[in-house]
Structure formats: structure tokens, C-alpha cells
Amino acid sequence: MIKWRCTLCGECCKRYVPLVLPEDVQRIQDTLQRPLSTFVTFYRPTDLDEPLDDSDERLFQTKDGKVAMGLSRVELEGEEREGCVFLKNNLCSIHEFSPLLCRQYPFQPQDADDLDGPLRLVENVCFGKHAEDEVVDEDPYRRSYRLFQQKYDEHVQQIAQWNANPQSRDRSIEDFLSFVGLQWS
Ligand code: SF4
Ligand code: SF4
């Protein structure tokens, strides 16, 4: 049993860059009718607060080096700091169609091999101030985690296939997007 409640402090969306899947990007693009370039950024491993290891499976090769696809960050209104491009007044403005990664935060399975098993809070959870006055209904989070894991596995397989092709070293981000079914706009 996990006791936890989100206090909507917004810290997680200010500190973390969510790396997104092609289907997240497509869903957001279709729903908001907004060009991909207005909400997606391609991050080099050292651009992130917690730098990615060069061998991280989320990095894809381009002619300009390896990058990972994440949501963009912007200067937050009224605050001298950055946060997710979709964070408005400490709330997620795309909650109903947010990235799969965001949906199960801040939980993960206690046992990574047992996606139906009990959950636990992720490490370094809630840099802000969550409360412990509610018992969490784990089922929706478990379902989200399962879906995320399935789509994530498919995507890292795509990336592995792309990276294994020596020609990818001469290709652009736009070429990669087209490889995973997206279009630069
Ligand atoms: S998409 Fe929403 S939940 Fe995810 S980081 Fe951005 S504001 Fe937060
Ligand atoms: S850091 Fe925790 S309490 Fe704050 S908004 Fe994120 S999930 Fe909610």
C-alpha cells in the first residue's frame, strides 16, 4: 500500500525533461494541431540535468551526433526558471493526452519483471512536497506503466535498428523522424 498525494507543486515538470515516444509526439501534434518543432527538442546526452550515458538506448545517431527526443523547455511565466513547455500554473496543460512516461509518475513496479505486481515510489520522487494522506489506487498507474513499457520497448528496438545501419551516421534528425513515422514540421 502506498500513501501519497500530489500537491501540484509542479517540481517534477520543472526538473525533469520527459523523453518522449513517437506515438506521444503524434498524439500531441494531432490533438493540438501544432507543429512538432514547437514542443519537441532533440537533446544531446550532456544537455540533460542527469546526462545520458553515450550507450543509452534512447539515443539515436545523426550526422551531428547522438540525440534523444524530449519535450521542450521554456522560461516559466512569473518564475526565473525553466520547465516543461506544457506546464501552466503548475498544472499539465495536456493532462488528457500527456506522454506515456508522465502518466505513471511517480510510481514504478517493485519488481521490473512483474508488471502486475505492487508498485513503489520512484527514487528521488517529488522534489517538491507530496503529501501522505491518501492511499493510492495503483491499478491505473499499473496499466499506464504496462502500456508505456510496451511502447518503449518497441521504440528502443526501432532506435537499435536505426543505429545499426552505418548510413545513419550521415543522416539528419528529419530522416530519423521519417523512419519512426513522424514528420518534421
Ligand atoms: S507533459 Fe505534462 S506531466 Fe509531462 S512534464 Fe510536461 S507538464 Fe509535466
Ligand atoms: S513533484 Fe510530486 S507533488 Fe509535486 S507536482 Fe510532481 S508529482 Fe506532484
Image (spheres, helix red, strand yellow):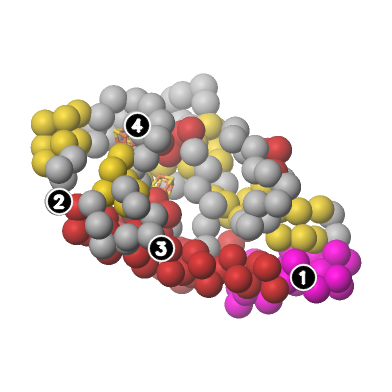
Name the residue tied to disc 2: 137
The C terminus appears in which quarter of the rendering?
A: bottom right
Q: Which mark is residue 155?
A: none
Which is closer to the viewer, label 2 or label 1? 1
Residue 177, located in which quarter of the rendered image? Answer: bottom right
Give yes or no for contact between labels 1 and 3 (Cβ–Cβ under 8 Å).
no
> Who comes first in sequence, dot 4 or dot 3?
4
Specify start and end residues of the magenta stretch as a single range: 162-185
Name the residue tied to disc 3: 148
> Who comes first in sequence, dot 2 or dot 4?
4
> Who comes first in sequence, dot 4 or dot 1?
4
Secondary structure under tag 2 reads loop
Q: Residue at coordinates 34% horizontally, 31% vertically from top-left? A: 126
- How many numbered tags mark residues here? 4
Name the residue tied to disc 4: 126
Compute the Cα span from label 4 to label 3.
20 Å
Residue nearer the viewer, 128 or 37: 128
Amino acid bearing label 4: Cys
Amino acid bearing label 3: Phe
Q: Position of residue 93 (x, y in %)?
A: 36, 49
